[in-house]
Each structure stands twice: as structure tokens, then as C-alpha cells.
Image (spheres, rainbow, N blue to C red):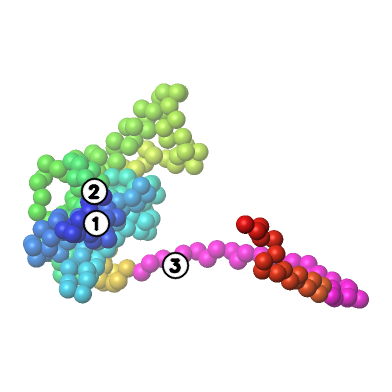
Amino acid sequence: MAKGPTYKVKFRRRREGKTNYYRRRRLLLSRLPRLVVRKTSTRTIVQVVNAQVIGDHTVASATSAELGDYGWKAGTGNLPSAYLTGLLAGRRAKERGITKVVLDVGIHPPVKGSKLYAALKGAVDAGVEVPHDPGILPDEERLAGKHIVAAYEHFQASDDSNQFSELGKKKTNITTIPSQFDKSKKAILAITKAELKKPTKKKPRAKAAPKKKVVKPKKEKPAVRPPRAVPRKPKPKKLIARDKGKKKR
């Protein structure tokens, strides 16, 4: 660790690896709202954020967990779901007066054709202008999930592979992902303007079942109490003369 009188402690979110403030500063200098795309192993989160002095203000947002309301039954952490999430967030932002944004991928590495740029493609198709290079966007086949179907058929042909084994136990039909994609995309594009302007409500979490209280058996009090112990009297200390025990020279 660096030491010395000139060492400056970095901001907390920089120490935790959550925010790159140099990149954030360059984005804020554009004076445009940010299209914030964040991904986890199970879902994609897309938000349109305005930076203010008192803090960031989220204008519109969407998560891949909402896609089930529009006919999506496949996983929520893949590339087609990222596109649909960006499309839904872009439509909400467009109806709330946002026409141009700048992409903010945070500390995620900018990989060509990744889920980050699939969400960007969805926002662009929703009518929001985002400065980008068209070469970084995934192709239409990957957006529709055809690569997932091809991988599933490839690994099902080989008996030694354990790929897609968990999905096979759940009886999930992966071959219908392209048709689900088209159905969900049409459903998102068919959302009325009145519904898009409404604030997104978070679904309440299911309450866990109350834990059963363990009733401890009560200790029975004895009918006759035992007699209290009498403290012993301390023995008197023996007085020893100061000169006693010393050797005479």
C-alpha cells in the first residue's frame, strides 16, 4: 500500500471497484442522460439516468425480470433478454421526453457483440439516439437467440456433454426461443403510451412463512428451597515482625 504525506485515499466506490470516476467524468461532460447498462449472471438492468448536483435521477428503467409479463419464458440472463430489456427501457424513456443518451457500461469490459451492446441495440430500435459504431452490435440471429438453439442441438447430439442438463430436467423447450423473442418484441412494441408513462412498480416479494416458535419446557420450582450457604469467616492474618527472617550480617 502506498504511504507518505502526498498519498490520497481514493473514493469508496473506486476502492470497491464499482465506479470508474475518470470514465464517469467524461460521460457527464457530454451533458446528455446516460443509458446505464448493468448485467449479472441471471438478469440485465437498463436505466436512463440524469446526473444532478443532489444525485442521479432515474428517468426510466427496465429489468429482464419484467419480460415474463410480455410472453418471455426463457432465461433472463442471455443475449435476447438483454435486447428486449433495452427495448422496453428505450420505449419508456422515449415517452418521457428522452430522445438522445450516451451509453454507460460502468466497469464492464466493452466486448463486441456482448449483452451490453444487445441492450444498446434495443434502445436504438425503440427510437432513442445513442452515439455508437454499428460494427459492435450483435447480428440479428444472435439477437433472436438462434445461437442458443444451435448450441443446444450440438450438445444434445453428444452423450458425454453435461451442457443444458439442468434445463432438460425442468423440461424447458429451448428450440422455441426465437418464436418467444418475436412474440415478446411485438408485445413490447404494442404497449400503449399511457402504460409507458406510468412509473414502474416493483413487485412485492413473497413473504416467507413465519417460523414456528419453539416452546421451551418450564423448569419446575422445588417445593422446599435448600438452605443458603453460610460464607466462611476469613482467617486472621499472622503478624510477622519486620526483622524476622532476615539474615544477620
Extreme residue in the right direction: 224
Between 24 and 240, the one lying in front of the other is: 240
Disc 2: which residue: 108
Q: Residue 208 lies in magenta, yes or no?
A: yes
Between 49 and 218, the one lying in front of the other is: 218
Quadrant in which the C terminus is drawn? bottom right
Q: Is residue 79 above or below residue 154?
A: below
x then y, percent, for residue 147: 29, 36
Q: What is the crowding at mark 3: few (fewer than 14 residues within 10 Å), some, or many (at least 20)?
A: few
x then y, percent, for residue 166: 47, 38
Answer with the quarter of the image where residue 217 lies: bottom right
Residue extent of the magenta highlight? 201-230
Q: Say left or right for 208 vs 9.
A: right
The kind of residue on which mark 2 rests is His
Disc 1: which residue: 14
The kind of residue on which mark 3 rests is Pro
Disc 3: which residue: 204
Q: How far is mark 3 from mark 1, CA to CA?
A: 32 Å
